[in-house]
Image (cartoon, helix red, strand yellow):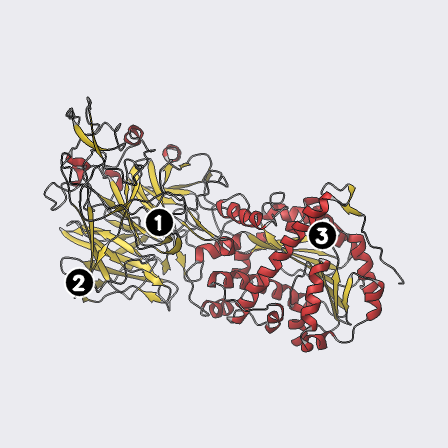
Amino acid sequence: MNMEIPRTDKMSSTNDGSDVKRGRNKTSKSRRETAVQGTNDCSIVSKCSMAAQGYFDDPYLQAFVLKLTRRAPLIHRGYYVRAKVFEYMLEKFLSTNKGQKQILSLGAGFDSSYFRLYSKGLLTDTVLYEIDFPDLVKRKRALIEAHPEMMAMIGTLNADHSQRCPQIELSGSQYKLLGVDLTLTNTLDAALSLCGADFDQPTLLLSECVLTYMTRRCSSSVIKWAAETFCNSVFVLYEQINPDDSFGLFMQGHYNTMGSPLRCLNHFPILQSQVDRFYTQGWENVGAMDLNQFYLTVLTGEERERMEQLEPFDEYEELHLKCSHYFVLCGNNGDCPKLIQGWKDSNLDKAGAEPVYHKDCITLTTPNLSSSPLQRFGHVTCRLLPQDTAGLLPRDTTELLPQSVVNLGGFGEQGGKHMRVTELVITDLTTLESQIVNPNVDNKLVEVSRMHGTMSCLKDGRLLLIGGRMSPMKLCSQIIAIEITNQNCSQSDTTCNRDVNKESKHSNNDESRHLSAECSSNSNQVTKDFNNKCNYCNKSFGKKDTFQKEAFEERNLCNCDSQIPSVIQATSDESKGSNLSNDSAVSSETLDKLNLNDTENDDGQHSQLACGQCESLKVECTVIEGTSGEAPCPRWRHTAVQYQNNGVERILVFGGRNQSRLALGDCYMYTPEENLWTKIETSGDAPTARHSHTADMWQGHMVIAGGLLGDSTPSSSVHLLNVELMSWKKMDICIEARYSHSSHVIGDYLILIGGVSLSHWLPGVAMVYLPSCHSAEFSLPDMVKDSIVMLHRHTSTVLDDTTILILGGGGNCFSFGTHLNSSPVLLDISKAFEVMEGLQKH
């Protein structure tokens, strides 16, 4: 066909389909196109790094990268799955379609598939066409021409094609490079025809993160054009879904910031809407699955095992979230065989009953606080309780009101940088304000700022930090004892002050409160008259109580000793004591009485305690040495619970992972009084090996819930271990599989909060009535882009029977950046309890 292709210099198509003269819109359109092309430049660097680490065999990627830059393991794994998707689709199409065939790569960017497939001898009787923006393909041509071995693979060029059609950059016998805007389908038709495309041949069309940058109308037009133009074809689409959850909102924000918004994402937000779209545009058979499903059902076990051994990795949450927000779809027309089955055919679908879901039953509230030094994840949390005035052992905990929690370790923001956190944070549960203490450590201690360890609370007030990691290659073998003491000063003592570091900044740019272990002079105290009673002890105030300037002046609290926190006696999110509902937790009514919006003084000084007592906290960390017995191997992402048996205090450690094993299923007991480890032999229906699960105590049983199994699939199981008989029992319940969640036992209810699953929705709150196994799932409230809460790798603590405090959480969200929750967050589950009571009655 002798055809001259006209240029389209004067007219351009707008988003609504009307034609306007190029002018003011040209600038905004060109900016968008440049930003979209920039995503190609970022992507090719990551692909090249991934291949260099042995994930994928493609030496030709290096031709399109000026400098090799090593990316993080999370980026490698994400791009590995992406590369395997297209490798699988290409090679299956080539092997199942005999004779002449063709491949069209729409928005090909710097893809190197032609050279990889040609070198493997897989392109017999095949012509591959690459189409992208004219400016980008000119750059690609220059890079290819700089490598003679690649030009040799293309062979003799047809100069006549390029002369007659300016859109044709390269035209070899099997490789064609075209510079055409995909919205100009008439121009694309003409260029393909001039290159010799046969619209009746079996044709594979590839779209790798291309249509999502177009408007709904333009992208759907491309899909319809492909269905009408190629009668025997397969269309493979790879792009994003699920825009409305916390990860999806964060992902959208990243692309908006880059100037390349995902313009189609909200029009076709879920997998089914993408499938329906293809049927509407003329495709006869459509199958789709997300990347988690592809990874687990298409790739072989041997291949997954090979990949797992390439480099240390510990970002499962972010990888699974990324893969649940990307999908691959195949639309078929004519005689071309299917390349994948539909998502409904996937063996990831649950067998048996589905969990019962309820909406609008839980709420998340972020208090308006002056600062938030709790922006971290992978940390541990423990409760602080009041101590007697002598500073010795805690008093009877049933008489005391829990006042504070301590948070230690994890990864977050410190000193304006993202790093493993060394600061210990104390959070007052009556005000939800946080203060920072820098622990004192002995010279042997090097493993305080660990991630994914456990912290258990002993009856003598010490905390035991067990397990965890400094990095995936450096595990923590030390058991660390942490002692927190307070040095109290009289209200009338004017020689008391704290050394406040005004220079430390957190991500919200508020000044943080740093506590020293010493008291010095203070010239900022004032005298204020009070004529009221304490909200806690009901004792009348004196007329001249000394309070720090502007701090807690309206709290209506005295200096009763119930306000002096120090020694820890409650349990952490991963090492909880039995039956949290029996703790004298802070009630909602109590929280309402307190002002949650206090700010620190203009001079940078911290707010004092509610009763006006000046506290000075001292944190000492020491290594426990000389342990005997059979100790567990170093591990992280395990659990530990503390309990007493015949008056002897014990700690049970279960599961986790280490460098060589992706999941552990063993159980060990530590006896602090004897400094003794014992490996526990159990009987019954034991849980399979796992990590990132939760453990609680309930009526003499350790309750193990969820977790990530050795094959990288989350578990929905709940197991009970009778700690006297050491016998396991599996509960017959139906909840969403999850891991990296937190949990509590309130009365006879097991509460599971957040986590990560392989579903297309993020787990909310699961409740299990342990005596009868009744269970239900409660969906998360809709997220808002300006106040995203990610409920994984967080911790939590119970405030009262219906209120739970979320502390920290978040993660490295693939290549989109790091999200740290603006902690703390209040979770109200009162309506969920009402639903559970109704389910039990019926």
Residue beneath disc 2: 676
**Badges 2 and 3: C-beta atoms under 8 Å apart?**
no
Q: Is residue 375 visible?
A: yes
Q: Residue furthest top?
A: 531
Type of the residue with mark 1: Met
Looking at the rendered image, the disc whose residue lies closer to the viewer, 1 or 3, is: 3
Q: Earlier in the sequence, mark 2 or mark 1?
A: 2
Which mark is drawn over residue 284? Answer: 3
Question: Label 2 to label 3, Cα distance in Å?
Answer: 67 Å
Crowding at dot 3, Cα within 10 Å, few <14 / some 14-19 / many 20+, comes out as few
| Helix, strand or loop under label 3 | loop
**Badges 2 and 1: C-beta atoms under 8 Å apart?**
no
Position of 700 with respect to 340 (left or right) is: left
Residue 600's x, y, as percent?
31, 37
Point 11% across, 46% down: residue = 392
Q: Earlier in the sequence, mark 2 or mark 3?
A: 3
Which mark is drawn over residue 731? Answer: 1
Q: Split into 4 quadrants, where in the image is the C terminus?
A: top left
Is 629 rendered above or below residue 537? Answer: below
Q: Split into 4 quadrants, where in the image is the N terminus?
A: bottom right
